[in-house]
Image (cartoon, rainbow, N blue to C red):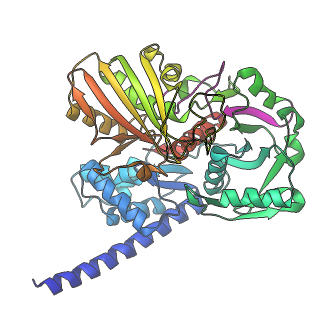
Amino acid sequence: MSIITNYEKEVVNQAQVRRATTEFINIVNDLWYDRSIELVLFRNPLVDKRASEVLNLIDYAKEFVAKPISIQDALEIAKAIQSIKLPASKLDIGKLAYEYHLINDTNTDKVDFVKNQLKDVTEAKTIAPKDVVLYGFGRIGRLLARELSSKMGKGSQLRLRAVVTRGKIDATVLEKRASLLSIDSVHGDFLGTVQVDAENDALIINGTTVYMISAAQPEDINYTKYGINDALIIDNTGAFRDKEALQRHLVPNGASKVLLTAPGKGIPNIVHGVNHLENNPDKIDVFSAASCTTNAITPILKVIEDNFGIKKGHLETIHAYTNDQNLVDNMHKKNRRGRAAALNMVITETGAGKAVSKALPVLEGKLTSNAIRVPVPNGSLAILNLQLNSETTVEVVNAIMKQYALEGDLVEQIQYSLHNELVSSDIVGTTAPSIFDSKATIADGNTIVIYVWYDNEYGYSHQVMRLAKHIAKVRRYTYY
């Protein structure tokens, strides 16, 4: 075959692949917006993705499970899902494609296969939508607003109804709030619409009204005035950290639950996927989603503890600089944080080592920790140096971690990286709180060193969302 003939075949093939990808994307979006069925690919979101993004995820899936998964497989399984009656749900099309290849019979009808795999999804779970109020509108607050608005679908789960901030609210302030939500220097443009409704002190996000409320303290607000009832308050201000202070949100004003996006005192500190089922939202009203670093390392530490046992260890987190540091050298109440954040590596403390034990009590007193803030605006790295109860190898550690990333209770929390060239900017926008760098693992007898990347803003925000759905009891059926 001549080079020219071969090239012409490649051109025809890539056109067919692109056409199939476009058809797949249309089905993904139709299922989501028409039937509240969300398709993901090994936990990676697919709604509103471009063709190139989908094809890159297909390539990852093929390498991850070592099976010849193609866009055609994904398309045919998506068509099968579209053809059968299913309730609102979240289905991993990567896992379905993987399981289809495992049966070693490519002649099996995909509709029959999907029906068999999803046979337990017979009746829709009764879900009462939950109103959500964001108390604070900083980095995490705005990412949560983006996620809540873009994943609203038919509004059967979490509904963003209001945002509370300090200071006056007028047309100028609303325009600035809208701009900060629409455009982000780290995470790019919001794939939605944001308009200002100055007459009603509100933003219209993707066509729905979100009231902007000014208040100096929680007791000043009556949410029922805005048609908001039984709301979940997500407090991302950091101003209230203990149970007594956070309960101030629960005065008779239309709020019923509180979720703090920081470590809390006297309340359950939860890493979703690890200990969320130990805390019943029917009995508890105030929760903490712990910290971004705690959410990054706890799932990984649970895997290691469950399989090897941990004698002791040290955590060093190489963390992006944050808003609490100074832009230029100036006074700061904490040591070293007063030095220019974008010009220096800054040693500081982290409570993540101790905080892990709130989710994994077995690790109480076993971990020391420290942090280095570095000149990047987002994307962090945790280095875990652990002494185990048994000896192991790099291959064994990686194989176990890969299995947990593929199936089980931690599939939403752990992403397994196969990338030889992984750097911090590559992990920005990852929904998993823990990205296990399989190429960096070190093992020497009973000592291992593990590298865990995490998007300290985006990945953490998705953990907050998962926990919010648990608290609100609006989680749909998931097939992972």
Q: Residue furthest left?
A: 1
Q: Is residue 419 left or right of residue 413?
A: left
**Residue 362 or residue 316, whichever sits in front:** 316
**Which residue corresponds to the image point at 71% horizontal and 37% vertical from the top-left?**
237
Rendering quarter of residue 229: top right
- Magenta region, residue range: 252-274
Q: Residue 255: say if magenta.
A: yes
Q: Main secondary structure of the magenta part?
A: loop
Q: Residue 460: say if magenta.
A: no
Q: Is residue 389 visible?
A: yes
Residue 230, image x, y percentages:
78, 37
Residue 42, image x, y percentages:
39, 49
Q: Is residue 440 left or right of residue 212?
A: left
Looking at the figure, which quarter contains the N terminus? Answer: bottom left
Residue 384, image x, y percentages:
37, 29
Q: Is residue 407 visible?
A: no
Residue 114, image x, y percentages:
39, 54
